[in-house]
Image (spheres, coloured by chain):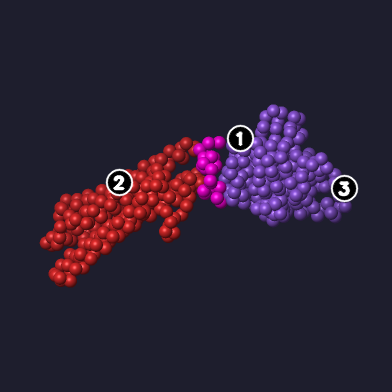
Amino acid sequence: MNDAQAKLTVRGLKVFFGQFLALRGVTMDIAANEVLGIIGPAGSSKTTFLRALNRLNELTPGTRVEGTVLLDGEDIYHPACDPVMLRKRAGMLFALPVPLPMSIYDNIVYGVRLCGVRTRARLDELVEQSLKAAFLWDEVKDRLRTSALRLSGGQQQRLCLARVLAMEPELILLDEPCSGLDPISTARIEEALTALKARYTIILVTNNTKQAARVADRTAFFLMGELIEYGPTNQLFTTPHDSRTDDYVTGRFG
Amino acid sequence: MQRHFHEELAALKHELVRMAALAETMIGDAITVLVRRDAAPLTAIAGMEEQVNAMQREIDETCLRLIALHQPTASDLRFIIGAIKTNGELERLADQAVNISHKAERLLEELPLTTFVLIPRMSSIASSMVKDALHAYVNLDTAQARRVILSDEQLNELKATVTNEMTALMRKEPATITRALDIILVTRNIERIGDHAKNIAENAVFVAEGRDIRHTHEL
């Protein structure tokens, strides 16, 4: 993969929390329109890496970042880069769904309205598009005005995905999005991700290695803040090059 | 759960080693019938064949269950796929030992045709290949697997030598034709055992390195 094709170019990325070096110099290219799976045991800095891609780490006091992250060739850590605009381009989904205490409809248009979209027709269109893309439309189309808090956990998570999509991001960053979901809800999210990669670049942090195997085009294995191995998912799960990767994906540790 | 899974893998290895040991005994016994003109081992061979067949079904069932319940990956997945293939090779090479014993039994009813020198040598090479290929597979010893693959050539050469001798004999004395043909077929059976052992050795390389060297003439 050369720089011309890469959506994200990460070079020597280090993240310090105070004196502690959490991410130890990661270099990788992430292609557009692919799902990248990030696996590794707890404490391997998967989430820190993910949060370095939309500059969420800096909300933690004492954080320092070294190295570069280029999004379509632009340095996201350049002083001229507005983190709020960056986070609009790089939407994020967390382990626990965070529906806002308002209707399904209002949840989805919340961010869009903040960005100045006001016309009713446009908002309706965004709600329908996003809910369809998140595989939730059929289940909620008749009750868009009811509270989002009444949805099941799996539906809430897809609602949050729809809310991310309504912002029309380029990257979707997912931090363990299925950890609290049942297998059927998990399958729906995975189906949605597979369909969404045609339009977005998706980075999925997961503790469920089987999920990375099912969904990701490429997989990266992190261990104690280092990127140990990065390659086509098929290769990582059949013939990993590094014995530590083999030990992790076969469940010998972690 | 993972520990339990890896214990099951260890048990699977053990079963394959046991199956290979049975097959080796069958080969040795079949050759005894032929060379020493001793019918005694025939019953034991038939009994061992049944055991090997039962083990083949059990091992495949174990592999299927391990894949379904644990969804293994990487080296574990390669090991289980290797077990399924190795299992099939062992059953087929045990069948070759049974084939040898049938010909040996038939030859008991006739006058001895020759003293056997090359056939015991072939059989001992084939038996070692089976043992070494299995050892290479369970211990991920690719150097040993490669030695097994190379020794297959010796069997092919010995088989050609015996075939030439028997053909000459048949020309000279047509009365020997049925017996000589049986002996040629025995060498073919032994050579097939070597081929199965070679397949197991190629499996061992796949399991250890993730490289498929079949039909590539690479080592």
Q: Which chain is purple?
A: A
For label 1, the residue is A224
Is B168 situated left or right of A251 in this image? left
Residue at the extreme left of the image, as rendered: B111
Q: Amino acid at mark 2?
A: Ala
Instruction: Name the secondary structure under disc 1.
Output: loop
Report the magenta residues as a range: A234-254
Query: Do dots 1 and 2 share one subunit?
Result: no
Q: Amino acid at mark 3?
A: Gly
Disc number at residue B21?
Answer: 2
Q: A66 or B182: nearer the eye?
A: A66
Instruction: Name the secondary structure under disc 2.
Output: helix
Q: Amino acid at mark 1?
A: Met
Q: Which chain is red?
A: B
Q: Residue at x 59, y 41 (%)?
A: A228
Q: Is residue B15 magenta?
A: no
